[in-house]
Amino acid sequence: HNGEGSKGNGGAMRAAVVGAWFAEDDPAVVWGEAVRSAVVTHAHRDGQEGAVAVALAGRIRAGGDGDSRLVNECRLPGA
């Protein structure tokens, strides 16, 4: 993968629980924790952004305040 890791969905598959766990926190916290959970196996930006999208959706579903449009804005800085 040329040092970028997988673009796969493993990070996203784990991320819903991240969003639920941090549902009461600021969306920026969920964002950061989702990236931290994905980067271990998915160093590529696409894999991390997928994890962020799923974590934000999980946060909203678990009762965290927020707007579902956040999920559409989950691009990492520099994208």
Image: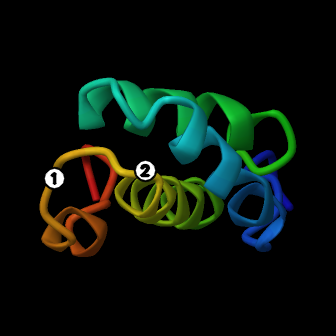
Locate the C terminus and report the quarter of the image it occupies.
bottom left
Residue 61 in picture, x, y percent from top left: 43, 63
Residue found at x 71% / y 35%: 37
Q: Specify the label residue 37 is tagged with.
A: none
Which residue type carries mark 1? Gly
Q: Is residue 30 above or below residue 46?
A: above
* Residue with the mark numbered 2: 59
Residue 66: mark in rendering: 1
In this rendering, position of residue 7 left or right of residue 61: right
**Left or right of 65 on screen, residue 39:** right
Residue occupying the far front of the picture = 63
* Mark 1 residue crowding within 10 angstroms, few (<14) / some (14–19) / many (20+): some
The kind of secondary structure element at disc 1 is loop
Element marked by disc 2: helix
Tell me where residue 50 sits by quadrant.
bottom right
Q: Nearer the viewer, residue 63 or 66?
A: 63
Q: Residue at x 77, y 51 (%)?
A: 42
Amino acid beneath label 2: Arg
Whether pointer 1 and pointer 2 mark residues with C-beta atoms closer than 8 Å, the reply is yes
The disc, 1 or 2, on the residue closer to the chain's N-terminal end is 2
